[in-house]
Image (cartoon, rainbow, N blue to C red):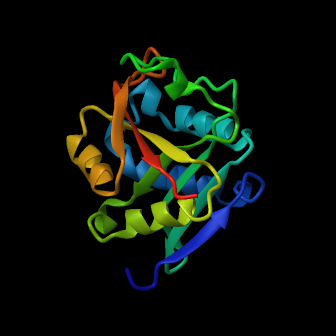
Amino acid sequence: MDGLQLERRDATGLDDVRHELLDVYAEIYADRLSEEFHSIERFDERLGWNTEVPGFAAVVGYLDDTPIGYAYGCTLPADTRWWNGLLTPVPDSATVETGARTFALSELMVVDKLRGTGTARRIHDELLRGRPEVRVTLLVERDHPKVRGLYETWGYEWFGELQPFPDAPLYDAMNLPLQP
């Protein structure tokens, strides 16, 4: 995508663009905002939780100074609740976090008009560039097999089914090894 500008942000640098992120979220999830879990308030709450965790990072994509997408996540701390709600049996060691093992990609979104242009992949790759963790994990709604398939083409592998909150959708947890 010609003209795409990518800006890296940490937790303190996010405050000045937070309202823009909420606007992009509202555009993308317009048809689901009435669902409590997908409301702007709940999304903003989840965003806030992420910014409080060490290792938080975000990349915002702009075209003509207009935000068109972003990705963010954080390093999972040793006492993380990320794996709570995992419904698939896995070895205990698979979910042990050290505070340095796993980067959780919490959100990756791009406005409709730019889907299929490679923009999401560029934002994703910029976010993960230079990460010190050994793996990345993310959640994809089970009702979105096309999105899961896209992540699989990027090298992610299915890890298990997970429902992080009682009112959350059922997700596929996926992992991607990072190169040292």
Point out residue 71 in the picture as x, y percentages from the top left corner.
Answer: 51, 55
Query: Taking 175 as reference, is 97 above or below it?
Result: above
Residue shown at the point (45%, 41%) measured from the top left: 138
Residue at 56% in and 60% down: 127
How many numbered discs, if any?
0
At x 50% / y 27%, what residue is drawn?
94
The image shows residue 120 at horizontal and vertical percentages of 39, 62
Q: Nearer the viewer, residue 91 or 151?
A: 91
Quadrant location of the N terminus in the rendered image:
bottom left
The residue most toward the right is 12
The C terminus - image quarter: bottom right
Residue that lies at the very extreme toward the bottom in this rendered image:
2
Q: Position of residue 66 (x, y in %)?
A: 51, 72
| Quadrant housing residue 148 | top left
Q: Position of residue 149 (x, y in %)?
A: 24, 48
Residue at point 71% right, 57% down?
10
Rendered view: 100 above or below 62: above
- In the rendered view, does 30 fall on the left or right side of 12? left
Q: Is residue 169 left or right of residue 72?
A: left
